[in-house]
Every structure is written in structure tokens, then in C-alpha cells.
Image (cartoon, grey):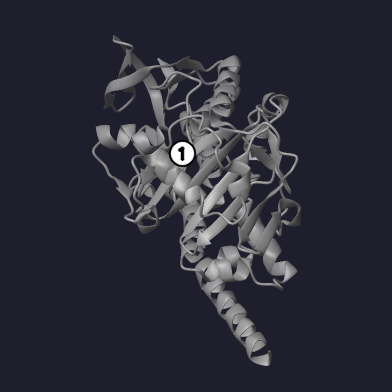
Amino acid sequence: MKDVLVIGAGPAGSVAAAYLVNQGFSVTVVEKSKFPRFTIGESLLPLSMEHFKEVGMLEALEAANFEVKSGALFVRKDQEMDISFDENFTPGWTWTWQVPRDEFDHILAKEAEKKGAEFKYETVISKIDFQEDKVVADIDEQGSVSTEEFRYVLDSSGNAGVLAKMLNFDVEYQATNRRSLFTQVKEEDRSPYKRPMRITFEVLQQDLWYWVIPFSNGNTSLGFVGNKKWFDLPAEDNNELFRKMMAQSDHFVERFEGKEFLYDVRGANDYTNSATKLYGHRFALAGNTTGFIDPVFSSGVAIATESAIKSAKLIERELNGGKPDWEMEYVAHMKQASEVFRAVVETWYNGDLQKIFFHSDIKLEIKKQITSILAGYVWDMSNPFVKRNKKLIKTVAHVVGMEEQATLLEK
């Protein structure tokens, strides 16, 4: 009997697998795709850097020479807010990377495999039985089915929700009425442009924004996210629609106009989700199903790796005879992250956070506190924007609005 079955080889699955094999457990990772494989979510947060270091993956990632992300630039017409992670209110990592996820995810998986985890690609779980003292799983590896026994299962299958479907509990999708479209282009020469390697979010409407994420390999990820009404333009296909939306940019028309897409434009609708159950008898969930909210602040991988480390440590304790309190130590922990990120996302789209971002005289302490959240440090209760999140953002936005109104009256 093996110790742990991990479902899904994305960042959550690979980080959890690496942690568990480092502690001496036998781990099998089952992944339905063949790696390297495409996925979206190329912007990381500094929070994840400590996770990569803890499981011994940092050196391999550094060797890949990914583009360093030291902050992010938000622009709206002639206004801008340049976030630098070295201004964090909460002590921690001050940089991370912008990564092509096919290469990045593959490195994580290969490192976990080098450490001793067994990876089975193009493989699915066709049947699973949670018994009192073990878990029995039928593993279908390209049509060849084998039955194996495990002591525990960690589902990091993300939007696939493998265990949720097999055990009949829900993954709830929130009807946000938002849509996303994305692709990549190749850039031969970035030198003519100001801050060409800075990840940038251009606000086109209060509820429509455009991402630009340059990679060190010369490719650049482009995407639009916003209310579905802004995508309602006459177009033969998503490629034509994307080009029409690119033409609305105030900052990037010249840079990307006419560039060939490296793949046909893809997209997703109403992607905000969370599982109604994160643990049970001999299983836990990690990754996107613990709560994916929105791509605007790049929280996806950070939440995934945090949930991976946290759940793997509780699994370790349980397999060693302990009795972790999953509700308090895991569910409440991940709920805290979701609550804070949900607050900044909701106040972004309702305009409150944008008022603060683009205020001409934002106070440094407020900027530091918000920067810490955008770096992923959402458990620091000494940060007022963590403790009071949506209420404080609304209050500060109101004050900013009054200051701007007073300035206009003075003129």
C-alpha cells in the first residue's frame, strides 16, 4: 500500500507531492494531461516563493531564468499606480516571476519526480472507494486499468473537480457575469517601449481590463477580463473579437497591432468557484477548488501552493497518528485568503479600489498595506486591509472621493 494519491500535477499537486516525499512518504501523482501542457495563470505572487524554497524547488526554478516580477503596473488613461513588492507592509518575499505555465508546471512536476514521487500522465481515476483503513482506486493509464491502495488522497485537480464529482459534493460557480479571453504573441524587439517587461493591467472600463505579461522567452501573454457586455462586438470568431478589443487600448495598440497570435484565442466564463467541502475521511482538496476568484490580482497559483503546503502538512500529521483539526487549521485558513481576495476583487470591479489606486496622492502606508495583500500576505491581521478588508476599502475610497471633490470645488 502506498501512502498518498495526488490527483492533478499542477502547482498544488507537485508542491504537495514534493513536500510529502521529502518527509519520507510514498506518493503517486495522477494527471489526465500530457506534460508540458497549456494552462493560464502566468503571473505569480511572492507568497509562493517560500513554498518553492521549503520543498526544495527554488533552485530549479531560478535556473529557468524566468522574468522577474518585482511588482505590477496598473494604468488608466494617463493615470497609473506602480506597485513594488519591496514596499510590503508584511515582511516577506519582495519578488517572484512571470512564467509560461507549460514550462513552469513541467519543471515543478519534474522536480517532484526527481525527489521520488511517481507521476502517471494521461491517466485518470475511474473508480475510488474510501474504506475505513484505506482508499482503493482504479487507475486508468491510457486504457490499462490497475487497482491500487493508498492511505490518503489529495485532490488538486482544480476545475476538473475529480473527487467532488465522484463523491457527489458541489463545486459552486458564482455567476459573476464576467468573461475572459486570452492568447500570446511573439515580440522580437521590446526596446522601443517604456518599461517593456513590467506586467501591466490597463483599465479600459471600470469592469473591463487588459493584461500584458511579458516572458523572458520573447512571448507575451495578452488577455481581457470584464463584464460580458464589453465582449458583445460583431466578430466572426474570438480572434477577430480579440483584435477589436486590442484596438480600444490607450497604451498598447502600437506595440501589439498586427502581431500574429501564437494560438487561437481561448476564454472562460463565470470562472469564480469554490468547493463546498475541502476534506473528509482520508481525503482533502487543494488548489483552485479551495477558492478561485478572479485573475485580476494573480492569486491563483499563490492560493494553490499555500493550500498544497498546508494540506500536505496536515496529511503528514494524520498519517503519523495525529488528529489535526481540519476545520480550524485548513478550512478557516483558506477561507481567510478567499475572504480577503474576494474583497479586493469585488471592490476593484465596483470602483472603490480603483479610486484608491488612481488617487493622485495615495498615502504611502495605505499603499504598503494594499501591496502586501497583492503580494499574497492575506493572513497578517496587523494589516488593517486584511482585518477589515472590504469595509476599510469602502471607507478609504469614500474619503478619496471627498478629497477629489473638494479639489474640484477649489478650482
Looking at the rendered structure, the secondary structure element under dot 1 is helix
At 58% from the left and 31% from the top, the residue drawn is 100
- Rendering coords of residue 275 (x, y %): 35, 45
Camera-side residue: 397 or 388?
A: 397
How many badges with numbers are in the image? 1
Q: Quadrant of residue 169?
A: top left
- Rendering coords of residue 313 (x, y %): 54, 35
Camera-side residue: 120 or 180?
A: 180
Residue wearing tag 1? 287
Q: Is residue 325 visible?
A: no
At 35% from the left and 50% from the top, the residue drawn is 270
Task: Give, as a three-letter code, the residue at label 1.
Answer: Gly
Q: Quadrant of residue 108?
A: top right
Left-right relation of 7 to 355: left
- Rendering coords of residue 378 (x, y %): 58, 55
At 54% from the left and 66% from the top, the residue drawn is 389
